[in-house]
Amino acid sequence: MSGPLFDSHALALRRHRAIRHGPRLFLAHRTVEDIADRLGFVQRRFGRALLVGCPDPGVAEPLADAADQLLLIPSLADIAQFPPESFDLLIVLGELDTTDELPTVLQILRSLLSRDSLLIGAFAGNDSLPILRATMLAADQAGGGGVSPRVHPRIEASALAPLLQQAGFVMPVVDLDRVRLRYRAFDDLVADLRGMGATNVLAYRSKKPLDRASLAAARAEFRRLGEESGTVETIEILHFAAWTANHH
């Protein structure tokens, strides 16, 4: 399919709405704390660092000691302001799972780092939201209008290390954190995703909301896939790290 995969304007609107209505930051806090722990094992002090994709300044607090100077920008759209080799630590929170040209973006991130510098971050992995996928399929079948693209395609963990190497990074490390969340109802999961600014931003998504029959089918399928105490959904957080050359 030609054209962009993701609607960047819709993504910005989703994030602004999440901030306006009160963002759900529990996964961001968990992810940043994990990144801070990983940085704790690196035997060096970084000078100038950049955190990309931080939804709230408070989320960055565990990273305060990671570098002498830590700059925060909300999205990848803001990195063009920096000249090459501006940083020796680059932290990317989310972002990479909603970019159209990941190989090119990784090359740009590589150019922002000086020699012997670290790229580290995390984003939602390929096996995230299996219950939501099944639920939305049931909703579309109930609606009778065919299956609509409602859940983002995502990057498999096994594909990321080669992409990092192709972009000029060395010693890539990739691993997974599977977070299981229990919900009483389908609408509670949707509320969390909206609060994270993580609902559908596919460029070719259906713009129509679910009709009454489809929404009822989604709620019923969500209950069916769970048990009396609720339905467990899984978020797969894909963590990665890689160096620029001359790291010893």
Image: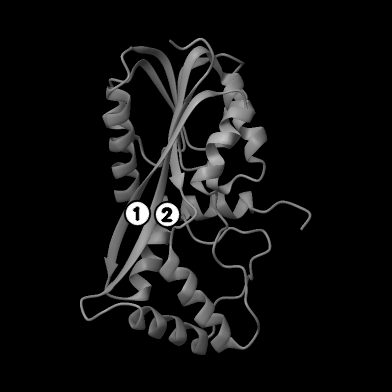
Depth check, front residue: 170 or 28: 170
Provide residue 237's location: percent of width, then percent of height: 40, 47
**Label total for image:** 2
Q: Residues within 10 Å of mark 1 (few under 14, many from 20)?
A: few
What residue sits 41% from the left and 54% below the top?
196
Within-10-Å neighbours for mark 2: few <14, some 14–19, many 20+? many
The label on residue 88 is none
Q: Which residue is mark 2?
A: 18
Identify the image quadrant of the N terminus.
bottom right
Task: Identify the residue position indicated by label 1 in the image.
Answer: 22
Q: How far is disc 1 from disc 2 in space, using C-alphas?
A: 6 Å
Q: Amino acid at mark 1?
A: Gly
Q: Residue at x 57, y 85 (%)?
A: 141
| Residue 216 visible | yes
- Residue sitting nearer the eye, 121 or 95: 121
Circle 2 SS class:
helix
Question: Residue lying furthest left in this view?
Answer: 229
| Contact, mark 1 vs mark 2 (Cβ under 8 Å) | yes
* Residue 79: image location, x then y, percent: 57, 28
Q: Position of residue 217 (x, y in %)?
A: 46, 86
Name the image quarter holding residue 225.
bottom left
Residue 83 located left or right of residue 53: right
Q: Nearer the viewer, residue 86 or 231?
A: 231
Q: Amino acid at mark 2?
A: Ala
